[in-house]
Image (cartoon, helix red, strand yellow):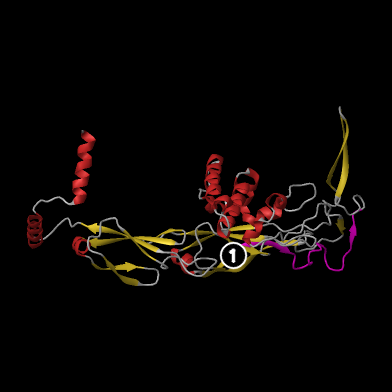
Amino acid sequence: MVCMRDFYEILEIERDASMTEVKKAYRKKAKQYHPDLHPGDEEAEHKFKEVNLAYEVLSDESKRQTYDLYGEDGLRNEYAGGGGGFGFGDIFGDLFDIFGGGFGANFSSGNTAKAPRDGGHIRYDLNLTFKEAVFGTEKDIQIRRTETCSRCGGTGAEEGTDIHTCDKCGGSGQVREGTNSAFGRFVRVVPCDECGGTGKIIEEPCKHCKGAGRETINRKLHIRIPAGVDDRSVITMTGEGHAGENGGQPGTVYVYLHIEEDAIFKRLGQDLYVEIPIRYEDAVLGGTIQVPTLKEIIDYEIPAGTQGGETFRIEGEGVPYLRREGAGDLLFTVNILVPKKISREYREQLESLRAVAGGKKSEDEKGFLQKIKDFFE
């Protein structure tokens, strides 16, 4: 299983982004990580390759549709190799190496009945809680896939019965069909109507699969979700898709992750954000407040004169990184609580405090008032 980074996440756009938005995001990111601006910076070069790869896919409607359904491996299978077709690797070179590299699919340019055909892919959408995504988890999922028939072993015939090559197509599964037109005679290749394109004639079809050589069954798969996955991450399960034909490789299961929001923490990448209410006197005098982290509630000392809306950072208390040690940061913003109802004693103390201040303006207040005066002059 491989956890890939999402192309939309790389360009920081929504999945329904228009082509104009895709181009705009690409220009911004390409400029940000261009090697000329970061000479010798391997990480910037890596990100620049990611950005270019993401744009090559999302700027093409056909490849974008394939990617939305099956992810990166779906693009490899559809565009890699293929006689006379589109060479996906020719355009991107080694760019796919940044995701773990190489084209694993084996394709044949021939279109015969005996040519290996890889199995189809399966998409599965999996919902995770916030904690499951942060700490990692294991899940069992149920899929429905096509497999080689358990009775006939894929031959499509009952055991002991005869299978012979189709006389009409000679085993190719294809025949040439000619048509006349005003421009001359045209010949096209079509599936053989005698054998149904299989190239073989089955005397007695398998009673279980009716001669198809394949059956559709339910399978339970076990998935390990690594700690730190984000919304729209994709888990690939190579070889767990539909069975191939004629020796072709089985397809891939793509598990798309959807992360539920948390009531306390907000997440941006590997960083966490939380808002913490504090009392007025703690903001003025400073003191110890309690801050929730992923593991526990910790005591944090805020300085005297803390302002409402001020943000503090605690390093390493965010979400674990996927491909390296460590974690992001926890950032918390303090909001000063102003009570709507107060006791008589509390009111008297506040009145005394206001009297002590004597109505004097702070430097910040003076500056703000001066800006207002300047505006109306």
Work out whether residue 373 or residue 267 is closer to the camera in this orientation and state it: 373
Left or right: residue 338 versus residue 59 is left
Question: In the rendered image, which residue does mark 1 sit on?
Answer: 142
The stretch of residues the image draws in magenta is 141-166
Three-letter code, disc 1 = Gln
Is 272 a magenta residue?
A: no
* Residue sitting at x 64%, y 62%: 100
Residue 53 image position (x, y, % from top left): 62, 51
* Residue sitting at x 39%, y 64%: 330
Residue 254 image position (x, y, % from top left): 61, 59
Residue 150, placed above or below residue 20 = below
Work out whether residue 331 or residue 228 is closer to the camera in this orientation and state it: 331
Work out whether residue 42 or residue 280 is closer to the camera in this orientation and state it: 42
Name the element at disc 1: strand
* Residue sitting at x 82%, y 56%: 115
Tell me the quadrant of the picture where the N terminus can be found.
Answer: bottom right
Q: Residues within 10 Å of mark 1 (few under 14, many from 20)?
A: few
Is 150 a magenta residue?
A: yes
